[in-house]
Image (tube, helix red, strand yellow):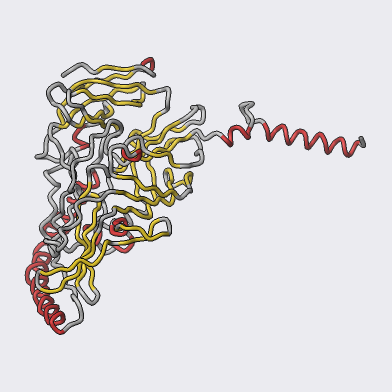
Amino acid sequence: MSPVRFERFKILFTLCAAGLLSCGNQPLFDELATNRLKVVIKGTYESNGPRLWDAAPFPGDDSINDCTAPPDGGAGSPDEFMMDIAEIRLNGEKFANYRRTFRAPLDDSSGFFNDGFVYENDDVPDGLYTHVNMYIRKMIFDNARTYHKTGPGAWEYDEDSETIFREKVVKGFDFNQLQVNSYFDSLRVESGRINRIFPLVVPIEGGLAYSRQNGETVLEIRLVIKNFIKKYEYDYYSDYHYVVHYFGLSDWLRDVKADESDIGGNVIAVARAYVPGKTATVRGTVGAAINKYVVMIPAEKDINDYKLSGPAPIRPLVDPPKPPSLAGYSIEAYLDYFLAYEKYKEDYNIEFATRLIDDYEGNYAGPWEAYNDACNAFRIPSLVTYSDDSGNFSFTNVPVGRSYKAYYWTGVPGSSDLPGKVGGGNFTSIDETVEILERDAGSTVTIPTP
């Protein structure tokens, strides 16, 4: 072999050896093929042991004010949930740039409403991550129905609503298109620049301290969907006054009123992180308080951080009057519109504008800002479960080396409510010092009965 060819061979051999070995003397190709971050998405309020689905039908919202008695009796409840996610980011940085669509039946055996599904991703650099950005393209429930008005108080069924999912026509209504803004957002000058759903920002409780030294790290993202559904009415106009009765997420947090199409701010979510092998199981009982939500929060947190500051919080009663819409193109429709518009001008100039002139901050801006701040401050615990018919409960995958406080919610929320609203119950302490030591990894820790 000539000296030149020999030198080339040495260089090639050195480069190959360097490429096959990482800094830790582990083959680089093995590292590229190993995904150390596992992202799991669930559709439950609970981190494990979710309560069963409430019996249908789901409640109707007060936004149903036009077609209050559908001629066909109306849809009772949806049977399926569909979701289309464009990608997920951590702290705004790309790491799961993969589109994912899925369909989940609304039953207790559905994986999405139990253990969740794994979202494909690429490992991220070591570091601390505080929030997740979810780019949700569509959220759909089936069994939405369309009606049109045929006369005073009279409606006619048109068809089951249809939309596009996975590039095909499906039965259902994409309520995600209405979640861009909340009604509060629509009142602001910058409303056109507000987007609450693309991306949806999900806080990671306690943060994700990611290290590739761990064999696997789980990032669990929970969207509250199970037992958090309502029926709404959406208005639109062409030759007729049309309405769609559709199912969406409950307005338990941000109230939706009649003739409003902005329902944003009601996708309530939380994320948490843990390392398999560095977790424990925590068990206990709430005694006679059976079938209750049980939560655990970090010892340094205050349980009041997971409650609303007030019964609703109460939405301000200082809404600007809503302008009328032209319901068709007949002479009668135009006459009705002009009469309604004169009433609208009177309400706006005499009632609403006078309040603003008297005290803009106190009568309008202040109450709305306080309402929005209270809604923004609400959080759900990262560890939640549900006690059984004997009052027993169990938390799984609880990170060790930390101290917690345990509570149960005294109320029994319905199919469109969550714990945390004053008047619906209260958080009662089970144990103020649940200490999970490093040596408890892989074992079960029992909380004393209160």
- Position of 257 relative to 322 (above/below): above
Q: Residue furthest bottom?
A: 331
Position in image of residue 277 (x %, y %): 43, 22
59 left or right of 133 in image: left
- Position of 195 relative to 286 (above/below): below
- Quadrant of image for the C terminus: top left
- Residue visible at 40% across and 39% down in the picture: 117
- Position of 424 relative to 352 (above/below): above
- Quadrant of image for the N terminus: top right
Instruction: Report the label total.
Output: 0
- Residue visible at 47% across and 42% down in the picture: 120
- Residue visible at 31% across and 56% down in the picture: 176
The answer to whether any part of residue 187 appears in the image is no
Q: Residue furthest front?
A: 72
- Position of 406 relative to 42 (above/below): above
Position in image of residue 86 (x %, y %): 43, 52
Position in image of residue 64 (x %, y %): 15, 59
The answer to whether any part of residue 450 appears in the image is yes
In the foreground, 174 or 209: 174
In the foreground, 144 or 297: 144
Residue 71 quadrant: bottom left
In the foreground, 115 or 22: 115
Position in image of residue 248 (x %, y %): 25, 52
Residue 147 quadrant: bottom left
Residue 33 quadrant: top right
